[in-house]
Amino acid sequence: MSETINLKLKVWRQKNTSAKGRFEIYDMPGVSTHMSFLEMMDVLNDKLIRGGQEPVAFDHDCREGICGMCSMFINGRAHGPLRGTTACQLHMRHFQDGETITIEPWRANAFPVIRDLVVDRSAFDKIIQAGGFVSVNTGNAPDANSIPVEKHKAEESFDAAACIGCGACVASCKNSSAMLFLSAKVSQLALLPQGDPERKVRVLKMVQAHDEAGFGSCTNIGACEAKCPKNISIAHIARLNKEYLRASLARD
Amino acid sequence: MNTLNSKIPDGSIENKWTRYKSTVRLVNPSNKRRIEVLVIGSGLAGASAAASLAELGYNVKCFCFQDSPRRAHSIAAQGGINAAKNYSNDGDSVYRLFYDTVKGGDFRSREANVYRLAEVSANIIDQCVAQGVPFAREYGGLLDNRSFGGVQVSRTFYARGQTGQQLLLGAYSALSRQIAKGQVKMYNRHEMQELVIVDGKASGIITRNLVTGELERFSGHSVVLATGGYGNVFYLSTNAMGSNTTAIWKAYRKGAFFANPCYTQIHPTCIPVSGDYQSKLTLMSESLRNDGRVWVPKAQHDKRKPREIPDQERDYYLERKYPAYGNLVPRDVASRAAKQVCDEGRGVGPSGLAVYLDFRDAIQRLGRHVISERYGNLFEMYEKITGEDPYQTPMRIYPAVHYTMGGLWVDYNLMTTIPGLYALGECNFSDHGANRLGASALMQGLADGYFIIPYTIGAYLADDIRVQVTPTDHPAFQEAENSVRGRIDKLMNVKGSQPVEELHKKLGKILWEYCGMARNEQGLNKALAEIKLLKEEFWKEVKIPGGTNEFNPELDKAGRVADFIELGELMVLDALHRKESCGCHFREESQTAEGEAKRDDNTFSYVAAWEFKGDGSEPALNKEALEFEVVHLAQRSYK
Ligand SMILES: Cc1cc2nc3c(=O)[nH]c(=O)nc-3n(C[C@H](O)[C@H](O)[C@H](O)COP(=O)(O)OP(=O)(O)OC[C@H]3O[C@@H](n4cnc5c(N)ncnc54)[C@H](O)[C@@H]3O)c2cc1C
Ligand code: SF4
Ligand code: FES
């Protein structure tokens, strides 16, 4: 493979939440295939700044796929073409010489654009605040080994807990539903004995917060799972539905 | 010179904390409702502190610069968290964890603090499990442990390779619960830009709203900094891109002493730099050294492919130099050895700044499936980044800046030299001496936040119950806000020709070259001169696009880099004055005949706490003498 490729970037530019956005096209010659996607954006920004233009704003922090901050819709796919990979872990060797790459922000009513590719995901925090916790004050905990947890349940709980809260599931869903994100938290806690006492209230409150935040409802399309960088399974949505049903029945 | 009072309680080391807790002054619940605490940072230290203080009834405001508290840099920690639970029944104890930490820190930490850390470590695991943190378990359903760098017991709890993520999400859930109750008010995308002091006490902060650019004033009875480490002063590090020194640097400039700024940990196993565009470095877990063998070619500039180099032409230098510990020597020793072979011209890869970490023999011995079970996700991560398959060809690794042991000086209460100002987690200097052991930063952050500050802050606030918070129209707030605005305008008005990143890279190069893995007087003096020039260059050349009153990440970065440059100068001064080698601080002038770090306990057994004396003046050095009453001082040896 050649070490550098020439690209065109078609990037969404939007000054602020209320401004009207548009695409801009930038030439990117000589991109090293060893770069990460965000490093390629750094190089673009360096050029823009030197040329007296405003750089493209994008969210990022850890650059190793764990903080959930990066959020780019690349060529029509959340986080780009690779499965199980965040935008920051994507490298330029996966693109072709001469390609045009389209880069957009997450698009969803519950995630308003702040600037360019940066969106406001505080609706996710609200869902967690509604019940994504175990009510245990500091200092009240019993010895950690006093309650054994079956290994396979702990593992399954972990699979759900691996969610990084990036929002790719919402961006990929044509209903802009956050069910995958929500179900991951409900599932994590439902699988552990520590989460049991608040199981019913938790699911009811979190679903309510989800709906109030303006996320759409789930119609089982599965696009979320396909684009989730942490491979969170839609089996968690099935568990969520069961939990919800059980809790609703108990309430009446 | 100011005398530093570390306020260590009386009594034997085992009884200090227990006695402290039962005699410390308390704030009664109805008064807690009248008290406002500002917590800056929502990483492990900040989130755990904010949640615990709110549970006690204090009114808390918490700040972070990311878009959610869940994204703090703590999220990236991989390996695990230590605790003296002795679940493995292998003879672990509070004393052993304490001892290992003091020794690992090369006898440059404060015994009483370290002992307390070891004491509360077990409670952390209990708390996290109760929150629903899915730690690794054994088939019987109980918690699993592994061992970690340089110790002989298995005391590390872990959640796959994502321990930091799971612990942070636990703290974030506790924090979220308090936010929902209205007991914590959370300010995302808010960066602290200045500390406000009234009558000598920390009384508030000025923040910049990173979305709108607005400057805001917040008043509190006390200010708790938990803003993380400053490794990004080197530009390239394993830290998240936004990690910075700004909050603690402002505090330093307002009178908080800065302790041991030059103690920086350089981690031996990171993916090497691949080009000029490189923005950060990725850590490959230390655990790889359990099965991987480190080597370079015996000959200089050997350009053959690794598999074409026969065994007798390879130098397994760690095994050769340290037969007892081999590939498992501590981080600082492994890093320096890698630098040495590369300096000799035997480094590998396109840049010559890398060594091999080879799994060939382990795969032959154990089979590919065993290696894949142990390290599968790390191998995948490596392949994602480099495009090379470590099952077929050895990994290339090189040391990278990882953690800063230095930070704001704090006493036993975790209070800085400014009354009412606390520092928790990586941003203080307290527990790791001159070198931190693996899996102990997570432990320290959570110990500080969950179990220490909730007690120690009461000792200060008990006096404050009748005092109203300072109104934000107080002249001190006005003045602080003016100075922040003045600086932002000054930055925007430079209108030079170099983007912030370029200037930051220059700073990183100077520090890496002269104040990195090995340091000497001549180099450090050179660094001082170069940083002075760079500072001038920065204020003449920096180019910041966009405006002040809008979302402007370049402006955010510029402010942080300006502070990094000043900090860099202090780091070099500190490294220059400490003529001994200790832990991660290797002064070439102070080494044993075999080339190992040589401490000078008679002269340097102290914490260097630097005091700001104004721009253009040398900072003053204050010393806290370190007394070792329990652990015997000894030269470390890994031969
Ligand atoms: C790749 C990697 C792996 C690691 N692995 C391990 C491990 O296995 N075990 C271990 O024990 N340690 C590990 N460490 C170290 C450990 O992760 C950190 O030391 C620790 O998480 C720091 O926590 P903290 O709460 O002090 O700070 P951080 O998590 O860095 O949090 C800082 C907080 O402060 C906020 N902040 C900063 N500046 C400002 C400002 N000016 N205004 C407002 N808010 C601000 C940020 O938004 C953030 O919320 C690792 C570190 C790295 C880099
Ligand atoms: S479920 Fe997946 S896509 Fe959705 S927020 Fe979590 S990690 Fe991101
Ligand atoms: S920047 Fe952290 S996940 Fe991409």
Image (cartoon, coloured by chain):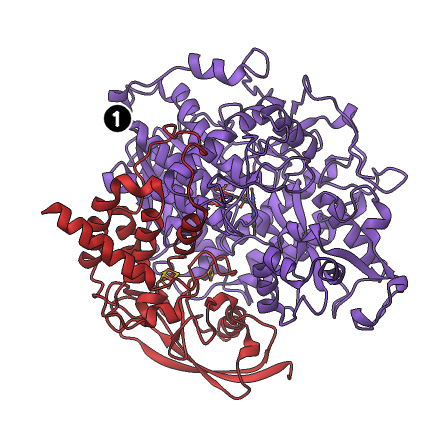
Chain colours: A red, B purple
Residue B216 rendering spot, x and y as whole percentages: 32, 45
Residue found 57% across the figure and 11% down from its top: B11
User: Which image quadrant shows ligand 2?
Assistant: bottom left
Residue A129, given in percent of the width and then of the height, sits at 27, 47
The answer, for residue B212, to whether it is visible in the render is no
Residue farthest to the left? Answer: A252
Q: Nearer the viewer, residue A218 or B605?
A: A218
In this view, which residue lies farthest toward the bottom? A98
In the image, is residue B208 above or below residue B424? below
Q: Is residue A76 left or right of residue B231?
A: left
Residue lying at 77% horizontally and 54% vertically, measured from the top left: B338
Q: Residues within 10 Å of mark 1 (few under 14, many from 20)?
A: some
Q: Secondary structure at mark 1?
A: loop
Which kind of residue does numbered mark 1 sit on?
Arg
Please provide percent x and percent y for residue B115.
Answer: 58, 24
* Residue B421 image position (x, y, % from top left): 44, 30
The residue that disc 1 covers is B34
**B51 relative to A155, above or below:** above
Horizontal side, residue A223 vs residue B137: left or right: left
> Which residue is at a point 55% across and 76% down the rendered structure image?
A92
Q: Chain of mark 1?
A: B
> For the point 88% across and 65% down, which residue is it?
B300
Quadrant position of residue B435 = top right
Instruction: Return the residue nearer the eye: B184 or B490.
Output: B184
Asked if residue A48 is positioned above or below residue B344 in the image, the reply reads below
- Which image quarter holds the N terminus of chain A? bottom right
User: Nearest the camera: A23 or B405?
Assistant: B405
Q: Nearer the viewer, residue B621 or A91?
A: A91
